[in-house]
């Protein structure tokens, strides 16, 4: 429910303060929008780079597939114990940050296992690392994108609603107060004229 506009000097001062506040906040919001947009662009470039690296790694692993077909249970030598993440801050936004992946220690007899097992396990580890990094980067983009959407909505609210509405309120109040002032001057002159005529009539 909208508040009825009061055509008073106090209301005019209130609207002027509101306009000054909106005008002060708007550049800050626009700067924030730019920062968030640039951060999303940077993250997307980083994700593309890691995606390319992941494709390369998968290609490398494909070369081991035929070898993995040997009678070796690779999964028994490979596993993830923990994905470590922390918290970071971008433009005042709390975001997850990838730290590391803790892998299960693979214990096996180097002499008894095929020569390719070490290299194969390292390739798998690198793949998992990249996949987990990409997951966190994607989370960051989603969080920052949501904040960017909110910021753009606020900018639109200020630019298209609040500021024009406040400017219009100031204009309307000024016109009303101006009319009131003019009417007061006219009434004053009329009253003065009447008093002058009464004075002259009394003197005659």
Image (cartoon, helix red, strand yellow):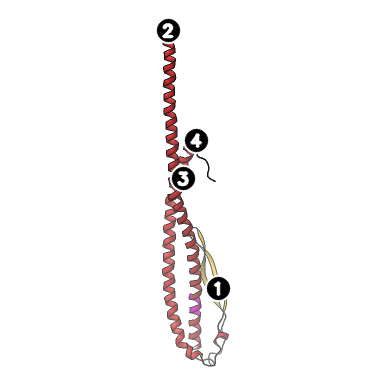
Q: Is residue 98 magenta?
A: no
- Give coordinates of residue 136: x percent, y percent: 51, 69
Q: Earlier in the sequence, mark 1 or mark 4?
A: 4
- Give coordinates of residue 180: x percent, y percent: 45, 30
Circles 2, 4 touching at the beta carbon (< 8 Å)? no
Q: Nearer the viewer, mark 1 or mark 3?
A: 3
Q: Earlier in the sequence, mark 4 or mark 3?
A: 4
For the residues labelled 1 and 4, the Cα–Cα distance comes to 60 Å
Q: Nearer the viewer, mark 2 or mark 4?
A: 2
Residue with the mark numbered 1: 83
Q: Earlier in the sequence, mark 3 or mark 2?
A: 3
- Residue extent of the magenta highlight: 125-130
- Give coordinates of residue 97: x percent, y percent: 51, 67
For the residues labelled 2 and 4, the Cα–Cα distance comes to 45 Å
For the residues labelled 3 and 2, the Cα–Cα distance comes to 60 Å
Residue with the mark numbered 2: 203
Q: Nearer the viewer, mark 1 or mark 4?
A: 4
Residue with the mark numbered 4: 10
- Give coordinates of residue 203: x percent, y percent: 42, 7
Q: Nearer the viewer, mark 4 or mark 3?
A: 4
For the residues labelled 1 and 3, the Cα–Cα distance comes to 45 Å
């Amino acid at each position: 429910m909208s508040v009825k506009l009061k055509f008073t000097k106090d209301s005019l001062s209130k609207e002027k303060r509101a306009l000054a506040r909106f005008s002060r906040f708007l550049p800050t919001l626009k700067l924030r929008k730019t920062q968030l947009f640039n951060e999303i662009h940077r993250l997307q470039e980083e994700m593309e780079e890691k995606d390319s690296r992941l494709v390369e790694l998968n290609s490398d692993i494909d070369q081991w597939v035929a070898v993995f077909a040997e009678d070796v249970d690779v999964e028994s030598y490979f596993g993830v114990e923990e994905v470590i993440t922390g918290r970071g801050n971008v433009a005042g936004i709390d975001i997850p940050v990838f730290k590391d992946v803790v892998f299960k220690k693979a214990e096996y007899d180097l002499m008894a296992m095929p020569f390719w097992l070490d290299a194969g396990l390292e390739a798998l580890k690198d793949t998992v690392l990249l996949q987990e990094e990409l997951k966190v980067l994607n989370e960051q983009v989603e969080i920052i994108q949501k904040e960017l959407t909110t910021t753009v909505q606020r900018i639109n609210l200020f630019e298209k609603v609040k500021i024009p509405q406040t400017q219009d309120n100031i204009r309307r109040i000024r016109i009303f107060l101006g009319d009131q002032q003019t009417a007061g001057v006219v009434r004053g002159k009329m009253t003065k004229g009447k008093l002058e005529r009464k004075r002259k009539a009394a003197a005659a």
